[in-house]
Amino acid sequence: MPKITYIEHNGTEHPIDVPVGRSVMQGAVDNNVPGIDADCGGECACATCHVYIDAAWLDMIGRPVPGSQEASMLSFAAVTQPDSRLSCQLQVTSALDGLVVRMPEGQH
């Protein structure tokens, strides 16, 4: 099972085994990781599962497709950066074993 490390804004790390096929957001919600609110339940409709992709993973994960629903929703996120993604849009595969994501200070 791939291990994903979620890092809260304050630096607290949460290494979690997330089943293949779940989203990065679902892995956080299933394990009560603070900092990912997921108000819409993973429907790409709220931007409250916003994360920053660790630099070492950015080339593999990529950025949202311009004009996509995810790109549009990120415009509502509090503080975006070039490495911003919505964790509901990141499906866990075995290739993501070791992924590191950081949460912003707040989701609203």
Image: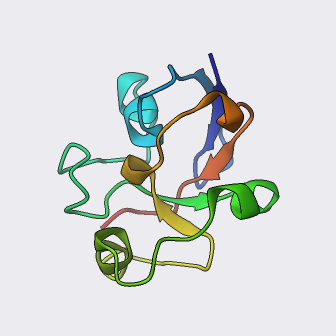
| Residue shown at 44% from the left, 48% from the top | 35
Q: Nearer the viewer, residue 10 or 64?
A: 64
Q: Nearer the viewer, residue 68 or 17?
A: 68
Residue sitting farthest toward the top: 1
Position of 55 relative to 79 (above/below): above
In this rendering, does residue 23 appear at all? yes
In this rendering, does residue 14 appear at all? no
Left or right relative to 19: residue 101? right
- Residue 22 percent across, percent down from the top left: 41, 29
Q: Can you say which quadrant of the picture contains the N terminus? A: top right
| Residue shown at 65% from the left, 40% from the top | 12
Position of 83 relative to 87 (above/below): below
- Residue 41 percent across, percent down from the top left: 21, 43
Left or right relative to 74: residue 101? right
Q: Nearer the viewer, residue 68 or 51?
A: 68
| Residue shown at 68% from the left, 48% from the top | 11
- Residue 91 percent across, percent down from the top left: 47, 41
Q: Quadrant of residue 58?
A: bottom right
Q: Can you say which quadrant of the picture contains the C terminus? A: bottom left
| Residue shown at 22% from the left, 63% from the top | 46
Left or right relative to 104: residue 67? left
- Residue 39 percent across, percent down from the top left: 20, 50
Colour scheme employed for the rendering of this structure = rainbow
Q: Quadrant of residue 83?
A: bottom right
Numbered circles on residues, count: 0
